[in-house]
Amino acid sequence: MAIQLAKHVFKAGLVVTTASKGEKMDLCKRLGADEVLDYKSERFATTYGNDDNKKFDVCFDITDEGLEMVDIIKEGGRIVSITGTPTLDEIRRVGGTAWILKLFLKRKEKRKEYKNAQSKNADWTYLFLSPSQEDLSTLANHLASGTIKPVLDGVWDFHSEDPQEGWQGAFNRSFSGRAKGKCVVSFHS
């Protein structure tokens, strides 16, 4: 969904992502990616980090490579991460105030990603995913208009006796790293 949102909703001029060779690269291009790097053999920092004309305004980190993103961000750009441990500021933003959290969470200012981004006058933010009615309604409107399209890997029957065809199959597929879209579990027979 990130590729489609970047390209078709936020109108990014260049959308670059990583995938494994073959079907997944083709899928990324069909969804709107302009360039797809082979995650096994190509690195963003090597491909884009040495040329200031190839650097990005915004990087969206979903693979915990925030430190590498600093090498490919333009001066004054923005890095948004959804991986790793949330920052204390982000927990507060979504309503968490328990003092025990302070023992385990780092302040944004203490994270290497933030410090490295600061050296380039770039903004580094952790985004704690917390769906809201407004966000889901906006996504539903984009789906209804065809701006973005759902990508399903498969549908599994919750009531199936066969573990590979039931919810366990969906769970296994989802966490295998091989799914090419959402794994849906159907509850009706």
Image (cartoon, rainbow, N blue to C red):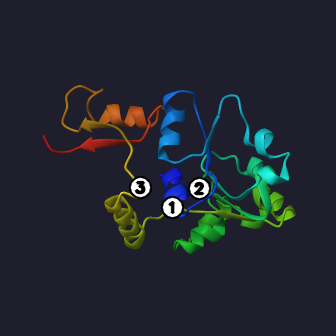
Where is residue 176 drawn, in percent x and y? 47, 31
- Marks 2, 3: nearer the viewer: 3
Q: Where residue 41 is drawn, which disc sits there?
A: none
Q: Is residue 29 above or below residue 74?
A: above
Q: Residue at x 37, y 71 (%)?
A: 133
Question: Is disc 1 in contact with disc 2, using a CB cutoff of under 8 Å?
Answer: yes
Residue that numbered label 2 is attached to:
82
Find out whether the residues at labels 2 and 3 contact each other: C-beta distance under 8 Å. Answer: no
Residue 85 in view, yes or no: yes
Seen from the viewer's position, the closer of residues 159 and 12 is: 12
Q: Give how far across and how far down residue 151 sits, in percent.
A: 39, 44
SS at mark 2?
loop
Q: Indicate the secondary structure of the residue bearing disc 1.
A: loop
- Callout in the foreground (1, 3): 3
| Amino acid at dot 2 | Ile
Mark 1 burial class by Cα count in 10 Å: few <14, some 14-19, many 20+:
few
Q: Which mark is residue 129?
A: 1
* Res. 106 image quadrant: bottom right
Among numbered discs 1 and 3, the one appearing first in the sequence? 1
Q: Secondary structure at mark 3?
A: loop
Circle 2 crowding by C-alpha within 10 Å: few under 14, some 14–19, many from 20: some
When asked about the image quadrant of residue 180, the answer is top left
Using the image, determine if residue 27 lies above or below residue 147: above
Q: Which residue is mark 3?
A: 148
